[in-house]
């Protein structure tokens, strides 16, 4: 049996808006993935720790407070420092177009804004996740 | 509302008509006989007639505006007396910039202020707290002490404006700062008008800015009720909010049910703490969402008003008519704004605002078209405010009270929403009330299920969102977005260091000790909070003292 893709859905920072995060968590689960949700108000350190501990393939970060440019790269740096080089790290939330190049330069593989179909996120994970054969 | 004979004749005529109507090929009736349901899953029929309101009694169920059960509005003259308060939620970056925005809005004809605080402030953390990095000034203005509030309200006459503050876990502390500021300006607390949101229950169930566990949080709220009823009689000591639960994905029925269940919990807690229901209930206000389904929303507001009046009378035996009146603020639904074709949002906001006005709101915030992309720019905010002004001054809907009353459909929908919401309230009662229902995750689960369902309907195309899953394309990049400088964290850090060096440290320490003493006793916290913030104790320092006594709430994460 093929091993399931493991996803950590995470809310860095102080933002409490987690409707999108929870809907996505459920969609990933319905798509056959194993999903862990951190809950709101986690520090980048806490997120990186859980991601490594749970040996996830994907970290999906959500932020609607505007703190993404500070928080997302921090999570990436912490994960890379822990040697989690293969982990796919994606982001979503209320993120202005202008910030997307910056986030991509800092290790966020893709950014999904409001109105993105669930299927787009699921397909993105399936086609970009790095799995050992 | 009709006699049996009239309805009998109508029934016969209707079935005859229906035979005719049935002959229309189903494909040409545009969903007429298939699947038309509201957000709450209430079936909508092709046609409503007196048959649908036959059980209604005008005096029992509607009455006159300003009279029980207030279905038609809480004042006799409604907007003929005075239009609703146009109150745009605003605040960003520094106190200086926000102060300029408030003055701009007042100059543009806005009639009340609504303060948005940033997340550190909402969580009782100072701007220089390590977790504040990246968040300072982002979703609202950063306020860490009375010194900040002095600048925020510079040149704004506190005795002439009403100020609504979206603040919950640390609401008592911000109210204390506002009272202290007014005192310094020679304005006594009884001259102050405004609202603190102060609704912790929906923070646990939807919004997320809780600090302490439910029991001490409810105690702080009781203290504000008791204090305001004596010292700040024109202040709304709470704004029981369904808005955020709706934003988190619940339906219209759930919004009414969960909000009123929270309201019941607050009233019950205050009565249990020894307060006379009529001493505070008149200052309990509400906050609802205005979502896309225009007529369901109108019915929702009317149902909520009637339900609260009945609850206060029958359950709590309130005597003062003002205790029975559900007065509410409305904000258009942020979650309906799309980042695709953002100009369409102006139209959505117009319809939602219209629902709020037709539903009899007391104050209104209209969202800006660019809010799915960032904080609103000044241009977008102006259009949003103008939208209210066009509805108020041009459309004519404000000319007569509750203009949709008597519509077979709207009355029927109002009744259905009340019925369905009462079922939820009964279930919450069975669970032991809203606090217990939240602790058991019931309300959170209900909201999550509805939000997932809503999203699946968008995915399947059953629910059409113009520009998102139908009529896509023609997107042009949106320019002039508001940008908040991330360097604010450092600037605010320096300001706090400077402020702390100016204040009398011994006085601060003594005041904080008194806060702690009051917290461990059952004394009202408000007087000691006012003294503490007046000595320039910071928000973070005060909340840390309370954290040390009350602990912090840590829920399980579920989805």
Image: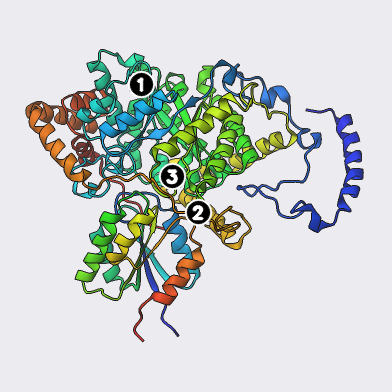
Placement of B527 over or under B481, stated as above or below: above
Say whether mark 1 and mark 2 are on the same chain. yes
Say what secondary structure mark 3 lies in: helix
Cβ atoms under marks 1 and 3 closer than 8 Å: no
Few, some or many residues within 10 Å of mark 3 (<14, 14–19, 20+): some
Where is residue B420, by image quadrant?
top right
Measured Cα–Cα span from mark 2 to mark 1: 45 Å
Dot 3 falls on which chain? B
Residue ID for mark 3: B436
Say whether mark 3 and mark 2 are on the same chain. yes
Q: Which of pointers 2 and 3 indicates the residue nearer the eye?
A: 2
Q: Which of pointers 2 and 1 indicates the residue nearer the eye?
A: 2
Residue ID for mark 1: B228
Does any portion of residue B311 appear in the rendered image?
Answer: no
Which of marks 1 and 2 precedes in the sequence?
A: 1
Could you say which is closer to the camera, residue B102 or residue B518?
B102
Q: Position of residue B504 (x, y in %)?
A: 8, 26
Few, some or many residues within 10 Å of mark 1 (<14, 14–19, 20+): many
Where is residue B104, by image quadrant?
top left
Say what secondary structure mark 2 lies in: loop
Could you say which is closer to the camera, residue B68 or residue A123?
A123
- Number of numbered discs: 3
Could you say which is closer to the camera, residue B244 or residue B283?
B244
Measured Cα–Cα span from mark 1 to mark 3: 27 Å
Q: Which mark is residue B340?
A: 2
């Amino acid at each position: 049996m093929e091993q399931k893709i493991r996803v950590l859905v995470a809310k860095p920072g102080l933002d409490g808006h987690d409707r999108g995060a929870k809907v996505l968590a459920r969609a990933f689960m319905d798509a056959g993935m194993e999903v862990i949700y951190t809950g709101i108000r986690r520090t980048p350190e806490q997120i990186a720790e859980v991601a490594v501990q749970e040996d996830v393939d994907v970290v999906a970060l959500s932020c609607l407070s505007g703190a993404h440019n500070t928080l997302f790269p921090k999570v990436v740096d912490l994960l890379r420092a822990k040697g989690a080089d293969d982990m796919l790290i994606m982001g979503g939330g209320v993120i202005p177009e202008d910030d997307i190049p910056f986030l991509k330069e800092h290790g966020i593989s893709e950014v999904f804004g409001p109105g993105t179909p669930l299927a787009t996120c699921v397909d993105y994970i399936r086609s970009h996740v790095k799995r050992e054969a | 509302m009709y006699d049996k004979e009239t309805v009998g004749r109508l029934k016969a005529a209707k079935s005859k008509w229906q035979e005719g109507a049935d002959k229309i090929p189903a494909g040409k009736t545009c969903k007429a006989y298939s699947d038309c349901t509201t957000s709450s899953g209430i079936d909508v029929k092709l046609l409503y007639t007196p048959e649908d309101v036959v059980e209604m009694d005008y005096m029992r169920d509607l009455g006159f505006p300003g009279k029980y059960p207030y279905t038609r509005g809480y004042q006799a003259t409604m907007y003929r007396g005075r239009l609703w308060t146009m109150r745009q939620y605003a605040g960003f970056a520094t106190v200086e910039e926000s102060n300029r925005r408030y003055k701009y809005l007042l100059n543009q004809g806005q009639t009340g202020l609504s303060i948005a605080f940033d997340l550190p402030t909402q969580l009782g953390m100072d701007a220089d707290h390590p977790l504040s990095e990246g968040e300072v000034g982002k979703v609202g203005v950063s306020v860490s002490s009375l010194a900040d509030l002095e600048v925020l309200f510079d040149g704004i006459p506190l005795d002439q404006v009403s100020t609504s503050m979206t603040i919950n876990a640390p609401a008592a502390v911000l109210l204390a700062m506002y009272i202290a500021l007014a005192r310094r300006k020679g304005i006594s607390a009884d001259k102050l008008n405004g609202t603190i949101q102060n609704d912790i229950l929906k923070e646990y169930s939807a919004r997320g800015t809780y600090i302490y566990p439910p029991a001490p949080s409810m105690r702080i709220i009781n203290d504000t009720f008791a204090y305001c009823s004596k010292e700040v009689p024109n202040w709304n000591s709470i704004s029981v909010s369904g808005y955020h639960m709706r934003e988190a994905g619940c339906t219209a029925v759930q919004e009414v049910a969960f909000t009123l269940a929270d309201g019941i919990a607050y009233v019950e807690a205050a009565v249990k703490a020894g307060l006379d229901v009529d001493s505070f209930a008149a200052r309990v206000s509400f906050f609802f969402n205005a979502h896309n389904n225009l007529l369901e929303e109108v019915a929702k507001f009317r149902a909520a008003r009637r339900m609260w009046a009945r609850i206060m009378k029958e359950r709590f035996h309130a005597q003062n008519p003002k205790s029975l009146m559900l007065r509410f603020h409305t904000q258009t639904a942020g979650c309906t704004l799309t980042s695709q074709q953002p100009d369409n949002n102006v139209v959505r906001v117009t319809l939602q605002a219209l629902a709020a006005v037709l539903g009899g709101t007391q104050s209104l915030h209209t969202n800006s078209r660019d809010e799915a992309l960032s904080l609103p720019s000044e241009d977008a905010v102006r259009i949003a405010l103008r939208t209210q002004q066009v509805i108020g001054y041009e459309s004519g809907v404000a000319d007569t009270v509750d203009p949709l009353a008597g519509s077979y459909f709207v009355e029927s929908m109002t009744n259905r929403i009340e019925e369905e919401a009462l079922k939820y309230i009964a279930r919450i009662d069975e669970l032991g009330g809203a606090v217990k229902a939240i602790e058991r995750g019931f309300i959170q689960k209900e909201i999550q299920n509805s939000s997932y369902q809503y999203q699946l309907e968008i995915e399947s195309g059953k629910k059409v969102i113009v520009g998102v899953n139908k009529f896509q394309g023609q997107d042009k990049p949106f320019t002039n977005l508001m940008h908040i400088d991330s360097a604010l964290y450092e600037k605010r850090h320096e300001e706090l260091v400077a402020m702390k060096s100016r204040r009398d440290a011994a006085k601060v320490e003594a005041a904080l000790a008194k806060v702690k003493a009051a917290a461990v006793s059952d004394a009202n916290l408000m007087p000691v909070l006012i003294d503490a913030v007046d000595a320039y104790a910071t928000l973070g320092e005060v909340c840390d003292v309370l954290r040390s006594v009350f602990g912090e709430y840590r829920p399980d994460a579920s989805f």
